[in-house]
Amino acid sequence: MKICCIGAGYVGGPTCAVIAFKCPDVQVTIVDISQDRIDQWNSDTLPIYEPGLDEIVFRCRGKNLFFSTDVDKAILESEIIFVSVNTPTKKSGIGAGFAADLAYVEAATRQIARVAKESKIIVEKSTVPCKTAESIRSILDANSSDDIQFDILSNPEFLAEGTAIKDLLNPDRVLIGSLTNQRGLKAQQKLADVYANWIPRDRIITMNLWSSELSKLAANALLAQRISSINALSAICEATGADVDEVAYACGLDSRIGPKFLKASVGFGGSCFQKDILNLVYLSESLHLPEVANYWHQVVIMNEYQKERFARRVVQKLFNTITNKTISILGFAFKKDTGDTRESAAITLVEYFLKENAHIHIYDPKVTKEQVRMDLVTDEQSAAVFQKRVKIYNDPYQSCKDADAVVVVTEWDEFKQYDYQKIYDNMNKPAFLFDGRSILDHKQLANIGFRVEAVGKQI
């Protein structure tokens, strides 16, 4: 069997690399129109940092795993085609700021329809709104014939960046949605057989197309809702003297609630949570369900409020001004064990601090200077501010040197191991430390001399 994946990004790359790893008899080709990205996948430095990914790619590449820009050839040769292209939130037009832009999905679909010379199974891997498969099917049906037929499956990903390989090797579940006709069920079974090479059958869940598409949005919305809920409680804790970690622990002991995703923080980020909730908001509005739309929109509003509230707290504690003061940002990725900065809370904080005329030092073990610049520079004015007021370091101690405050934004494990006495000795006094992830020993930091602030507690 030959499988191809259109889109060599955070989903397509790891997913299909694991398929190649677990299915040595299957030839997997990952294609992308970006020559630079494909060159990186074929190099010793992959374009994505994900623990365990390097070993799998290096073991399979050139054997049954290939990376190419020849999209047409891969389509022609493959029996199953994963569509794993970007679906960003629309920036203009109908649904701007909420709806997913499906231009890349449609372009990939039209290319498949144009190139294919025999029947294919098309698998939606990108996160898409409910009923997207209907649009894809319309395009494919218009280009099908008695000799060439297309079957569409929904196979949403539930990966968490930083643990994506672990999630792929041992998933909670794999969803495969299909039409309920004979051809759809047959295609569904064929994909299920691929996953069954390493995943127990009872974890491979089959359902209809629309349930599968909506399940992805629903799962991310429910997870984000928990984060916004505990972050809302963190504001009450700071005002009353309660400790949000203790409250979360007490609530998490209830078996109906459980402890996961109850960690208060500066706010959630990443490519999925906000995008998928906004998708759900737009879907609800499109279905004339304004109360449902408002309910889910509040999750995003609370997340933005949490980031802004944290940024204001930094300014207030530094005597209500950070003009010409230096703020050292530890962590720029949206979470640990990834280099992904999409929707990172660090971007919001840095932009806020720059508007307050602060100088910014940034250290992250996996995010490049080029990526930081890309996230912060949007026009000539921001480019001038970046050049004048932002410095990026490869050494955390240098980043903190002569700073007025250190702000921990990403929960990297290495941040727990630093010599904070050394950091304190080289900072301006009084030295402030704001723990946006509540990962440090606050009592020890206070004993050193830091003025410590953390989310959801008074110290």
Image (cartoon, rainbow, N blue to C red):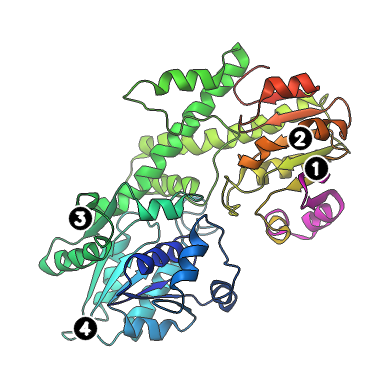
**Numbered disc in front, either 3 or 2:** 2
SS class, disc 3:
strand
Q: Which label's residue is closer to the chain start, 4 or 1?
A: 4
Residue corresponding to mark 2:
419
Q: Identify the mark at residue 208; answer none if there is no mark.
A: 3
Which residue is drawn at the image coordinates 51% and 58% (left, top)?
90
Q: Which mark is residue 397?
A: 1
Is 305 included in the stretch rendered in magenta? no
The amino acid pointed to by label 1 is Tyr
Residue at figure coordinates x 29%, y 63% from the top left: 133
Element under disc 1: helix
> Callout 2: helix, strand or loop?
loop
Earlier residue among tags 3 and 2: 3
Question: In the figure, is residue 72 to the left or right of 437?
Answer: left
Boundaries of the magenta span: 373-399
Q: CA distance from mark 1 to mark 2?
A: 9 Å
Could you say whether the residue bearing mark 4 is in a helix, strand or loop?
loop
